Structure formats: structure tokens, C-alpha cells
Amino acid sequence: MSVTRSFKNWVTQINYIKMNLTEILNWRYATRAMTGEVVPEAKITAIVNTTLLYLTSSGLQPFHLFLISNKEMKKKIFLIAFNQPVVEQSSHLIIFAAWDSYTTERVNSHFAYINKQRRMPDITANKFREMLLTLFETQTKEQHFNHPAIQSYIGLGYATIAAANQKLMLHEWMVSVQKNQMNYWN
């Protein structure tokens, strides 16, 4: 295949993606209530997988996703989520829990996990990992808190697009959750 033909195919694909994404986003709208219909697991899996594929700053994905469908758990969350009916009405909740700080343990654990998944030696990304650790040592607690929160919001954007692609509504609500509230859910 010639370079010109390959480039034309690439441009055609990009134009299709742009058109398709615009159609998806035009379909999406804010919800005030849920129908109570149970969302098929395949659609939930597609949303979660798309969200986890998003490229975070430094590649650390400084948040955890919690997928909740248990009614009792949703009731507990409802009580601390400003009594929003959609919390109990939805078949699933996807909660983004941002890291409260960057720690050496978290960074090292993330790199060990990635290296294991890619079947690469631990030393593969050592210079990058050490550069990140040095950077994080110079940052304030506020920076450590704000950066993962911003990354979580970007992840929420991806989840919203993924939900719209599945023709599902994703009620967008995010709040900073204190550790004592997270413990309340356990």
C-alpha cells in the first residue's frame, strides 16, 4: 500500500470518528431521573473498559473505579450524595475515587503492575518512574490532591462518552469524598 493511499485511509477514518463522536455527543443529554431498567453487564463493561483506556497524565491513572449495583450500598451512598434520586434509581453506579496523594508506594506499585501486564522487566521504565518520584517530592499536598482529581474528571468525561455510545445516560455527578465517607460505604 502506498503512503498516499494509507494516509487517505487514515484521514477517512479520522473524519468518520469525528462525525460519529459528534453524533454520539448530540444524542447525550442530562438526566434527572432513571427508569429503573437494569443495564446489561456487557454495556457496563464497555463503559468501564473505555474509561480505563484513557491516557492519564504520566500514565498513572491516579484513581480507582468502583462499580456498585448493590441496593443497600446505593442507599448508603444516597444518604451522603445530597439525596439525589438517581443514585438509588440507577442500575449501576460508577464511582471515581481519586488518589489523595502521590506516594512512592503507589507509583512503584503502578509501574510494577504495568511491567507485569506487558511482560517487561521492572527496570524498563526506571528513569521515567524515578523522574516522577522526584517531581512529586517537590509538590505540595494541595498539588497532590488536585492533580488526581482533575484526572478523575477527565476519566468521567470518557465514561460519559462511552455511556452515550452505548445509548445510556450517565448522570454526571462528582464530589470530593473524604476518607471517612469512603469507610462509611464499607
Image (cartoon, helix red, strand yellow):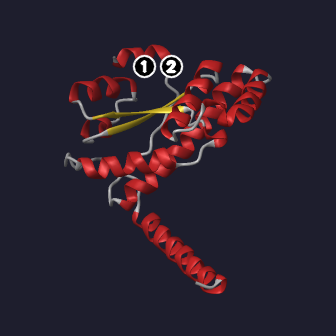
> Looking at the image, which residue is at 53% across and 49% down?
54
Amino acid type at image mark 1:
Met
Residue 167, above or below 74? below
Residue 166 is left or right of residue 155, and the answer is left
Residue 159, above or below 120? below
> Looking at the image, which residue is at 43% across and 66% down?
24
Q: Please tell me whether mark 2 sits on a helix, a strand or a loop.
A: loop
**Along the viewing direction, whichever of 22 and 58 lies nearer the viewer:** 58
Residue 51 is left or right of residue 31, and the answer is right
Q: Which residue is mark 1?
A: 182
Amino acid type at image mark 2:
Gln
> Looking at the image, which residue is at 60% across and 79% down?
11
**Along the viewing direction, whichever of 102 and 38 lies nearer the viewer:** 102
Question: Within 10 Å of the Cα at label 2, are there few (<14), some (14-19), or many (20+) other Cα atoms?
Answer: few
Where does the image place residue 29, in percent across and percent down from the top left?
Answer: 41, 58
Mark pair 1, 2: CA separation:
7 Å
Residue 119 is left or right of residue 148, and the answer is left
Where does the image place residue 164, in percent across and percent down from the top left?
Answer: 39, 59
Q: Which residue is mark 2?
A: 178
Q: Please tell me whether mark 1 sits on a helix, a strand or a loop.
A: helix
Taking the image as drawn, is residue 177 in sight? yes
**Along the viewing direction, whichever of 27 and 155 lies nearer the viewer:** 155
Task: Tell whether label 2 touches label 1 (CB within 8 Å).
Answer: yes
Report the number of numbered marks.
2
> Which disc number belongs to residue 98?
none
Give the image quarter of residue 139. Answer: top right
Taking the image as drawn, is residue 159 in sight? no
Where does the image place residue 126, in percent across and percent down from the top left?
Answer: 70, 31
Residue 79 is left or right of residue 96, and the answer is left
